[in-house]
Image (spheres, rainbow, N blue to C red):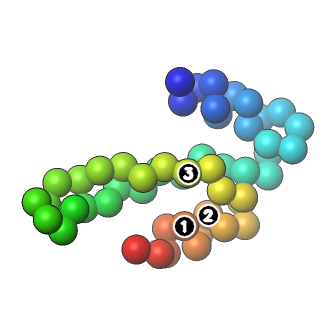
Amino acid sequence: MAKKVVASLQKGEGRGYAKVIKMVKSSKNGSYSFKEEIVPNENVKDFFAKK
């Protein structure tokens, strides 16, 4: 399913966006989960900077 999202971002106005994935550690039990979003290219660094 991720391939369809990434492929659709390569056409037209989609080039201005990026799919970002961040690994987040749970404070309750210490396990990791993944948070993924589609953000504008200008906000990629902001996505990884916030906790």
Q: Position of residue 2 (x, y in %)?
A: 54, 30
Q: Nearer the viewer, residue 27 or 11?
A: 27
Q: Are marks 3 and 1 in contact (CB under 8 Å)?
A: yes
Q: Quadrant of residue 5?
A: top right
Please state the horizontal and vertical placement of residue 27, each as a whole percent of the image: 18, 68
Instruction: Please give the residue where the numbered disc 2 appears in the rendered image.
Output: 44
Q: CA distance from mark 2 to mark 1?
A: 5 Å
Question: Does 41 appear above or below 6?
Answer: below
The image quadrant that residue 15 belongs to is top right
Callout 2: SS: helix
Residue drawn where x is 10% and y is 60% of the image: 29
Task: Please tell me whether mark 1 sits on a helix, a strand or a loop.
Answer: helix
Q: Amino acid at mark 1?
A: Phe
Give me the residue at 69% from left, 28% from top. 7
Q: Which residue is mark 1?
A: 47
User: What element does badge 3 sit on?
Assistant: strand
Q: Earlier in the sequence, mark 3 or mark 2?
A: 3
- The amino acid type, in three-letter code, at marker 2 is Val
Nearer mark to the viewer, of 3 and 2: 3
Spot occupied by residue 26 in the image (x, y as percentages of width and height): 22, 62
Crowding at mark 1 (Cα within 10 Å: few <14, some 14-19, many 20+): some
Q: Which residue is mark 3?
A: 37
Q: Could you tell me which residue is drawn at 36 percent across and 49 percent down?
A: 34
The earlier-in-sequence mark between 3 and 1 is 3
Q: Quarter of the image for the C terminus: give it.
A: bottom left
- The part of the image, by quadrant, that contains residue 13 is top right
Residue at horizontal 62%, vertical 50%? 38
Disc 2 packing (10 Å; few <14; some 14–19; many ≥20): some
Camera-side residue: 38 or 41? 38
Q: How many marks?
A: 3
Residue 41 shown left or right of residue 24 in the figure: right
